[in-house]
Image (spheres, rainbow, N blue to C red):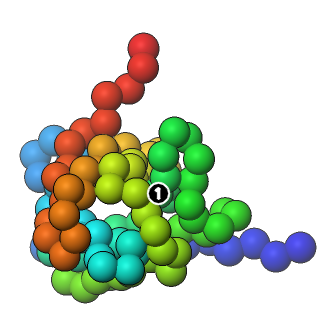
């Protein structure tokens, strides 16, 4: 049995804003011609996506996640992502912060909004 543990340390120079919550709206999401998704991370923080999907069904294989390095980009390996979907970013506390993504056109920035949670 193998285990992997990722540990990240945030230097004081790149502390979070006053409320201590990451604003994932700064990650630009683009739906590409082939249906894949590009995540442009414009922040000095690593960003980890633990969920990309629709209706509670993830498109990420098994237990994989997608990490986007600071000031970098990452593309999904799967294609034919629908124009409307959700992403879940793994936050500093290990939980998922969900966002609704709407990509009406390809090769342009998608519209991002905080996902409404059922009560």
Asked if residue 40 can be seen in this view, the reply is yes
On the picture, is 47 further left or further right than 81?
left
Residue at image location 39% in from the left, 72% down from the top: 35
Q: Nearer the viewer, residue 62 or 103?
A: 103
Q: Residues within 10 Å of mark 1 (few under 14, many from 20)?
A: many
Q: Position of residue 22 (x, y in %)?
A: 23, 53
**Placement of 16 over or under 32, stated as above or below:** above
Which quadrant holds the N terminus?
bottom right
Quarter of the figure with residue 67: bottom left
Q: Nearer the viewer, residue 56 or 46?
A: 56
Q: Nearer the viewer, residue 45 or 25?
A: 25
Find disc 1 in the rendering and name its residue: 52
Which residue in the rendered view is the most extreme toward the top?
Answer: 119
**Placement of 96 over or under 74, stated as above or below:** above
Residue at image location 25% in from the left, 50% down from the top: 102
Q: Secondary structure at mark 1?
A: strand
Q: Position of residue 101 (x, y in %)?
A: 28, 51
On the picture, is 57 further left or further right than 49?
right
On the picture, is 79 further left or further right than 102?
right
Residue at image location 10% in from the left, 46% down from the top: 18
Q: Position of residue 87 (x, y in %)?
A: 39, 53
On the picture, is 111 further left or further right than 36?
left
Asked if residue 7 can be seen in this view, the reply is no
**Placement of 115 over or under 48, stated as above or below:** above
Quarter of the figure with residue 15: bottom left
Which quadrant holds the C terminus?
top left
Residue at image location 51% in from the left, 39% down from the top: 55
């Amino acid at each position: 049995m193998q285990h992997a543990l990722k540990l990240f340390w945030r230097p004081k120079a790149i502390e979070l804003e006053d409320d201590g919550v990451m604003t994932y709206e700064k990650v630009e999401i683009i739906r590409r011609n082939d249906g894949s998704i590009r995540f442009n991370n414009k922040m000095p923080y690593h960003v980890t996506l633990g969920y990309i999907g629709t209706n509670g069904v993830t498109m990420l294989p098994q237990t994989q996640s997608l990490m986007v390095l600071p000031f970098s980009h990452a593309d999904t390996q799967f294609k034919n992502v629908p124009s409307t979907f959700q992403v879940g970013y793994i936050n500093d506390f290990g939980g998922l912060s969900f966002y609704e993504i709407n990509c009406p056109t390809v090769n342009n920035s998608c519209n991002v909004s905080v996902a409404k949670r059922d009560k």
